Amino acid sequence: DSGVTQTPKHLITATGQRVTLRCSPRSGDLSVYWYQQSLDQGLQFLIQYYNGEERAKGNILERFSAQQFPDLHSELNLSSLELGDSALYFCASSPGTGGYEQYFGPGTRLTVT
Amino acid sequence: GEDVEQSLFLSVREGDSSVINCTYTDSSSTYLYWYKQEPGAGLQLLTYIFSNMDMKQDQRLTVLLNKKDKHLSLRIADTQTGDSAIYFCAEKAGNQFYFGTGTSLTVIP
């Protein structure tokens, strides 16, 4: 158990809908990272937040957005969902900004039908 | 984006050593990582190495880094059936993180 929690574990929704994925980092960790894992794209870095501020942006679509709240939990919002958005979404956390020790949550499996 | 490449599959016999290889393209990488993913689970950080190091050893794991060839390897000594999983190589370059496709390690009893 990494100490990172993600909810929900599974999510099934229809195309065009909007969903919110939630992540609670390990106690004391200030950075949160979001990743998408799919069969065709592999594991892709989406975005990093550090202490509430966006720190780095990777391959995140404009339909997706994230935020980190004062209690350090983070949410990833996915809107106008397409079939290709079906994937595992992982959250990871680390103590600082360097990212050299990232601890991954168990993931949220999103299925878009 | 940057390319991080790994072979897709590796099979070894229990008790043998496993060597998983990875190549990357970005010479400005600062950290390089190895993660393990078991079925239905998230990624577990196994070890990481700073780009100015050549080798790091941690119990049964040995990481070798050849910066000139941009080649990273993970050696698992005395491989056990519990080591069967997918192993991901990853690099941090600037503020970005790039992952390989993963190597599926099968340990044959």
Image (spheres, rainbow, N blue to C red):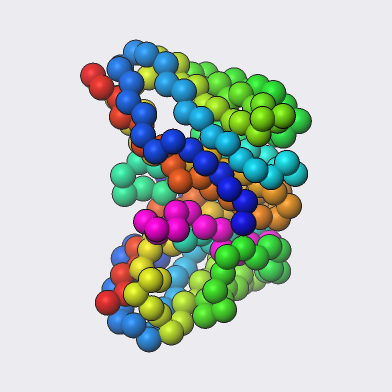
Q: Nearer the viewer, residue A26 or A90?
A: A90
Compared to residue B53, the image places residue B77 above or below, namely above
Q: Nearer the viewer, residue B57 or B18?
A: B18
- A68 with respect to A110 (left or right): right
Residue lying at the far left of the rendered structure: B109
Overall secondary structure of the magenta stretch? strand
For the point 55% across and 27% down, the residue is: B73
Q: Quadrant of residue A69?
A: bottom right
Quadrant in which the N terminus of chain A is drawn: top left
For the point 67% across and 26% down, the residue is: B66
- B27 with respect to B102 (left or right): right
- Tell me where residue A25 appears, x and y as whole percent: 54, 57
Q: Nearer the viewer, residue B59 or B79?
A: B79
For the point 69% across and 45% down, the residue is: B26
Whether residue B23 is visible here, answered yes or no, is: yes
Residue B59 is one of the magenta-drawn residues? no
- Tell me where residue A105 appears, x and y as whole percent: 45, 53
For the point 54% across and 74% down, the residue is: A61
Compared to residue B23, the image places residue A8 above or below, namely below
Q: Quadrant of residue B63?
A: top right
Where are the magenta residues, as a range?
A37-51
Whether residue A6 is visible here, answered yes or no, is: no
